[in-house]
């Protein structure tokens, strides 16, 4: 609402401004036209005055010629008349006047320059003309009228022809006025001359001639008609209405006709020419002024509209720029906010991550410590399991060592006796036997030492057969105790990637369990075999014991699972053996069998070096 009121006010101001500008421009253009008109009018008046001034003294000059006086007194014969006619004709030609003629005291034309023309003045009486009366009264007569004979408009100068004080007649010079119109014809300006009654007798526009500027009353009309000044003239007023009175002149509107296409505004300027009793007018069409003011107004309107458009564009552009800047500022602020929020989040996340990291690191350390503790516990367990095994085997070991000891003693006793008897070769033989027995004992000792040794668990490529042989030797006392038989079927070229101590421990464990299983059984066989698979070596320990109930198959590898009496088993052997097998990259499984037990130990085959 407020906006529309503003626009309406602006539009109204714009229109009013344009109207004011148009009015000002029109007045200015009219003033220019008036200025020009005034100049032209002055020139025209000067021209008319010059023209009249040129002929005014001519009749007086002619009147001084005695020939004219003589002629009026006694016109003489035909020759005399013709001679005067020719004289007047010559004068007329030289002075470039319209007609020059001589009248006697009655007003009769007795000689004329146009004596030879179609309608000569000679013989005609113009006594009714005021100029004649003025001349006969001894004055310079001057008059304007439409010629009754010639039908030509003319200005008459008449001067008395005197002899002494007597006025004999008058000499008249008539000036053709039409030439003054032809030369002053202009397209947008007309000049007109009115007599004291307002009758237009000179006009550069023929259609205006013998009209009146303003309506005349009947009395004046009758007087003019009586004077026969303008014979047959209608003396109709011009169809003209008055407009504004400007300092430069009167604005009038003239009826449309062919030459003046519509009711057009004109500027009427007037000068009076008192010597002739005339009013000289200039009528200037204001159409050009109107057109010029319209052109100027349109140009101004176009300029204003263009300026307004440019201003609107600039304003729009500036507003867009401001909006863009504000947008960019907002975007920057929001980016900053997002950035700082992000930074905060990153910082908090980083702190959180650092905390989590620390926690993880702590957890890892904890795990490592736990693993270390576990490994240590495991090793302790392995060791205690080994020691337990050794404990179990101690009776066997005892037997195993006592037997050679007793034999050594026997050989030594025998050797002493034989030495006394001097049977040296046999002594030597006994000593040989003793040496062999001590070797065997040392071997047994070293095997057990090896078994009891702690190991770092390092893996190496090693032949399988010697490890199996060592294990068998360690298990020998147990086997002996169970009164069992061990059958070993191992190809000599099999190699595995394993730790010898741990592998031997696993095998001793399995053999130990087998020995315990076959104890007291009618069949007491243990079979230890090995075979090469693709990239691994499978070692089987089978026995003719009672076997493992299927319900226990899953549980036997659990630590501390045992079916044995207290003091005979800890329930750790298989658990530790399975763990060792896994750590060496293999596996230990119990294979269900209808009779006896079967354990399969799979180990990676040794890498074959070329
Ligand atoms: P332990 O021998 O101290 O009991 P193990 O872990 O070596 O501990 O054995 C766990 C159990 O597995 C034994 O108590 C036994 O019941 C069973 N077992 C192991 N080997 C055999 C086997 N060869 N024959 C029958 N049962 C066996």
Image (cartoon, rainbow, N blue to C red):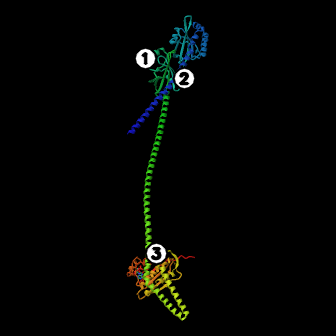
Q: Quadrant of the C terminus?
A: bottom right
Occupied quadrant, residue 68: top right
Seen at 51% across and 82% down, the residue is 466
Q: Relative to residue 13, is residue 181 drawn left or right?
A: right
Foreground pick, 465 / 212: 465
Question: In the rendered view, would you say 127 is above or below 39?
Answer: above
Q: Nearer the viewer, mark 3 or mark 1?
A: 3
**Mark 2 neighbour class, 10 Å CA radius: few under 14, some 14 to 19, many 20 or more:** some
Q: Earlier in the sequence, mark 3 or mark 2?
A: 2
Q: Residue furthest top?
A: 164
Quarter, ligand 1? bottom left
Q: Earlier in the sequence, mark 3 or mark 1?
A: 1
Foreground pick, 52 / 112: 52
**Mark 1 neighbour class, 10 Å CA radius: few under 14, some 14 to 19, many 20 or more:** few
Residue at the disc numbered 1: 218
**Mark 3 neighbour class, 10 Å CA radius: few under 14, some 14 to 19, many 20 or more:** some
Element under disc 1: helix
Q: Position of residue 487 (x, y in %)?
A: 48, 86
Foreground pick, 198 / 146: 198
Question: In the rendered view, would you say 448 is above or below 26?
Answer: below
Residue at the disc numbered 2: 184
Q: What's the distance in space between the residues labelled 3 and 1, CA to CA?
A: 155 Å
Q: Position of residue 339 (x, y in %)?
A: 45, 52
Seen at 51% across and 75% down, the residue is 459
Q: Position of residue 531 (x, y in %)?
A: 50, 81
Residue at the disc numbered 3: 582
Q: What's the distance in space between the residues labelled 3 and 2, CA to CA?
A: 139 Å
């Amino acid at each position: 609402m407020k906006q529309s009121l503003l626009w309406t006010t602006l539009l109204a101001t714009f229109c009013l401004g344009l109207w004011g500008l148009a009015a000002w421009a029109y007045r200015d253009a009219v003033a220019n036209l008036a200025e020009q008109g005034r100049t032209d009018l002055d020139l025209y008046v000067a021209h008319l005055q010059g023209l009249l001034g040129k002929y005014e003294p001519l009749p007086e000059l002619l009147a001084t010629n005695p020939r004219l006086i003589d002629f009026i007194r006694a016109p003489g014969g035909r020759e005399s008349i013709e001679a005067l006619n020719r004289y007047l004709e010559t004068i007329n030609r030289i002075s470039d006047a319209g007609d020059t003629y001589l009248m006697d005291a009655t007003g009769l034309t007795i000689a004329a320059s146009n004596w030879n023309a179609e309608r000569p003045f000679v013989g005609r009486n113009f006594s009714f003309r005021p100029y004649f009366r003025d001349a006969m009264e001894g004055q310079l007569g001057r008059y304007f009228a439409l010629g009754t004979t010639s039908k030509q408009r003319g200005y008459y100068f008449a001067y008395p022809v005197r002899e002494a004080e007597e006025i004999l007649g008058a000499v008249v010079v008539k000036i053709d006025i039409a030439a003054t119109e032809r030369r002053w014809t202009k397209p947008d300006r007309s000049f007109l001359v009115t007599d004291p009654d307002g009758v237009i007798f000179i006009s550069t526009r023929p259609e205006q001639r013998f009209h009146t500027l303003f309506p005349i009353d009947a009395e004046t009309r009758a007087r003019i008609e009586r004077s026969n000044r303008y014979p047959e003239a209608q003396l109709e007023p011009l169809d003209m209405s008055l407009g504004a009175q400007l300092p430069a002149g009167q604005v009038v509107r003239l009826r449309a006709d062919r030459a003046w296409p519509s009711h057009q505004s004109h500027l009427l300027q007037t000068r009076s020419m008192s010597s002739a009793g005339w009013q000289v007018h200039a009528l200037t069409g204001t159409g050009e002024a109107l057109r010029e003011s319209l052109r100027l107004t349109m140009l101004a309107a176009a300029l204003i509209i263009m300026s307004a458009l440019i201003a609107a564009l600039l304003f729009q552009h500036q507003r867009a720029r401001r909006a863009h800047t504000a947008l960019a500022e907002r975007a920057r602020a929001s980016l900053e906010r997002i950035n700082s929020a992000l930074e905060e989040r990153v910082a908090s996340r980083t702190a959180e991550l650092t905390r989590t990291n620390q926690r993880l690191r702590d957890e890892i350390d904890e795990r490592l410590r736990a693993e270390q503790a576990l490994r240590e516990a495991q090793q302790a367990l392995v060791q205690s399991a080994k020691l337990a095994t050794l404990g179990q085997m101690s009776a066997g070991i005892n037997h195993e060592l006592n037997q050679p000891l007793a034999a050594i003693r026997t050989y030594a006793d025998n050797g002493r006796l034989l030495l006394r008897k001097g049977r040296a070769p046999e002594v030597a033989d006994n000593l040989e036997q003793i040496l062999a027995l001590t070797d065997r004992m040392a071997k047994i000792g070293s095997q057990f030492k090896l078994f009891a040794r702690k190991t770092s668990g390092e893996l190496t490529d090693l032949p399988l057969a010697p490890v199996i042989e060592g294990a068998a030797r360690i298990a020998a006392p147990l086997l002996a105790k169970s009164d069992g038989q061990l059958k070993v079927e191992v190809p000599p070229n099999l190699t595995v990637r394993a730790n010898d101590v741990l592998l031997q421990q696993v095998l001793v464990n399995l053999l130990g369990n087998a020995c315990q299983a076959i104890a007291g059984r009618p069949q007491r066989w243990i079979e230890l075999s090995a075979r090469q698979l693709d990239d691994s070596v499978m070692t089987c320990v089978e026995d003719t014991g009672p076997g493992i109930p299927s319900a226990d198959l899953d549980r036997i590898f659990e630590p501390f699972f045992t079916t044995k009496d207290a003091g005979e088993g800890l329930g750790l052997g298989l658990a530790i053996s399975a763990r060792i097998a896994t750590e060496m990259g293999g596996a230990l499984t119990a294979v269900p069998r209808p009779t006896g037990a079967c354990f399969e130990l799979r180990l990676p085959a040794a890498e074959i070096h070329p």
